[in-house]
Amino acid sequence: MQLYNTLSAEERAQLIDEAGKDRLTLSFYAYAKIEDPKKFRDELFIAWNALDALGRIYVAKEGINAQMSVPADQFEAFRNTLEVYDFMKGIRLNVAVDQDNYSFLKLTIKVRNKIVADGLNDETFDVTNKGIHLKAQEFNNLLEDPNTIVVDFRNHYESEVGHFEGAITPDVENFRESLPIINEQLQDFKEDKNLLMYCTGGIRCEKASAYFKHQGFKNVYQLEGGIIEYTRQIKEEGIESKFIGKNFVFDHRLGERITDDIISQCHQCGKPCDNHTNCANDACHLLFIQCDECKAAMENCCSTECLDTIHLPWDEQVALRKGLQVGNKVFRKGKSDALKFKNSGDLSDKPLAKAEIKNIRQKIAVKKELIGKAEHYFSKSKIAQFLIEQKDLSVGDKVLISGPTTGEQEVTITEIYANGGPCETANIGDQITFELPFRVRLSDKLYRIVQNA
């Protein structure tokens, strides 16, 4: 009986392509008393693996915290797997506004001590004595009250690209750091101010609101369902958005645009930008904001040091990763001396630029046909290599290169080299190369765009 993911991200991406079905990205959480988290975890894996549900899920004795990707045609079947458990009957599923079939490429369910690392001793206060939940319009109304203090309980890299107007945005790396900082900062406002809090999906505020009530705050409120549910409500009900910018999400997309306001900068050149990426140097993997121009010039790297590293032979790159000190640098959350335009903490509400918001239906309506797959990228010469597997490809064709890390990149083919020489048309079975300003990966697919409706 399979209880763990057995496929690589590349293999899973290929299966998603072959299935040709739309998927839904969603999240949910529930605090509950779970006597045997390991047994609960295994039951979920068996049920969800059978539905081709993917995602990152944490379970603990205190409940479940899940971010997932589910085939759209299996949505009701997936919901039924939750209804088996009393504490998840009727649970709200926060469905993403902007969908991406590659948001998750593995089903990973881990047993943890807590579903959110809050650093709190739950035995010292009543975790069920939570703040009042507010829907989008109610949240907006309380924001207008001059007696309200609004606090963002997310991390610095999340609030930098988007936050509610007038919010306190702590310069913290994780949730547990923010609790004592905000408690100390607001000591003089426990009795007479409205403490209004929010996070991505609501789970952090569930615990934070109970903690602050325990600390003596009288008027504690939280955004029901977090920014994700707020976004759904304002779009469906035509409510004005008090959130500005982009909502950072913890999957391949790294963000959902809420408004067309860009409030952050490229960390390398300072140009208005709110697109997060991870450094292409696998030994670094720093999360940072990078514009398209810097992405091309720096080959998706955060520094010249990392740029030099990715051009080294692979065995030398692996050797440089050895050692605990080097390993601890991996997956840093966006702080480095190399990032000259990084902003944290006290952030401005003033937009720096406007983004072009793409119509979601328009994105789905793009008609494409599979041509082949990526095989290699030559970083120094910026040449991509593909294998033609399904249909011929000609100079002048508009193509889409798509993959879990690469995203979706549209380019027009201006020249092709097939099997070592230039040609006008490459045929099935040909190994082709052409110049690309961005890196491609083995999981990437090459499509011809037939119609862009």
Image (cartoon, grey):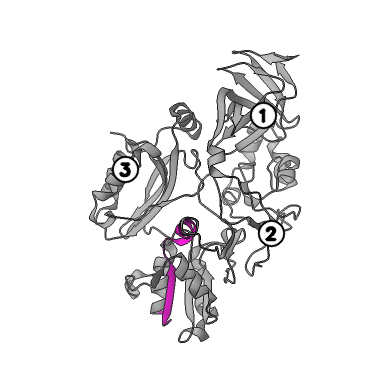
Q: Which label number is shown at residue 76? A: 3
Q: Is residue 217 magenta?
A: yes
Q: Marks 2 and 1, how far apart in space?
A: 30 Å
| Three-letter code, disc 3 | Glu
Q: How many circles with numbers are drawn on the protein?
A: 3
* Rendering coords of residue 275 (x, y %): 63, 50
Provide the secondary structure element on which disc 3 rests: helix
Provide the secondary structure element on which disc 2 rests: loop
* Rendering coords of residue 24 (x, y %): 43, 43
Read off the residue under disc 2: 342
Q: Which label number is shown at residue 425? A: none
Left or right, 143 with reference to 307: left
**Magenta region, residue range:** 215-233
| Three-letter code, disc 1 | Tyr
> At x 49% / y 32%, what residue is drawn?
13
* Rendering coords of residue 216 (x, y %): 41, 83
